[in-house]
Image (spheres, grey):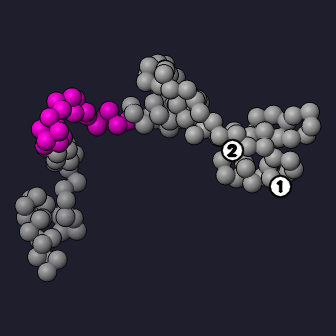
Amino acid sequence: MYGNLLSALKMKNRVKDSGRVFANDMRTIRRVFERQRANIARKLQNPRLLQIRFHTFRHWKATTLYHQTKDILYVMKFLGHRNIKNTLIYIQLEEAIFKEQKDGFICKAAKDADEAKELIEIGFEYVCTTPEGIMLFRMRK
């Protein structure tokens, strides 16, 4: 039953490679994306959705990654940029998008090394130690 459905789908999509169901051609992927985007824009009656491109997803990922880490060098390496000037735009985008949103943190305290180790394993970062010897940790929400 499924073999017939897959064969019909391959014929519909005009896939010549016997090991594939969907095309691996970038033009085909782009055309399917554009068709789906147009359908969604029409159904939701939102023409701004037509402005979304593949590169939009790359910009969004880089901007949110910078917002989470505040590490421009990490974002530069993640994107594969050779020059940091190309990555600096994401600082400006992050400031514009998240200017009204305050950075929220979850704060925890540890009394000994075992508690501190558990917090670090979960993803908390060390902030400081109080005069009483309590270690303070934080993690972005």
Residue 114's disc is 1
Q: How crowded is mark 1: few (under 14 residues within 10 Å), some or many (20 or more)?
A: few
Q: In this view, does 74 lie to the left or right of 92?
A: right
Tell me: residue 86, above or below residue 126.
Answer: above
Q: Position of residue 12 (x, y in %)?
A: 7, 61
Q: Which of 41 and 72 is in front in this view?
A: 41
What residue range appears in magenta? 37-58
Residue 124's disc is 2
Tell which circle, 2 or 1, labels the residue nearer the N-terminal end. Answer: 1
Q: Where is residue 24 in the image (x, y as percent from the top left)?
A: 22, 54
Q: Quadrant of the N terminus?
A: bottom left
Q: Where is residue 93 in the image (x, y as percent from the top left)?
A: 43, 22
Q: Is residue 88 left or right of residue 71?
A: left
Residue at 12%, 38% (x, y): give it.
Answer: 42
Whole-angstrom CA distance, mark 2 to mark 1, is 14 Å
Q: Which amino acid does label 1 sit on?
A: Asp
Residue at 11%, 76% (x, y): give it.
Answer: 4
Residue at 48%, 22% (x, y): give it.
Answer: 100
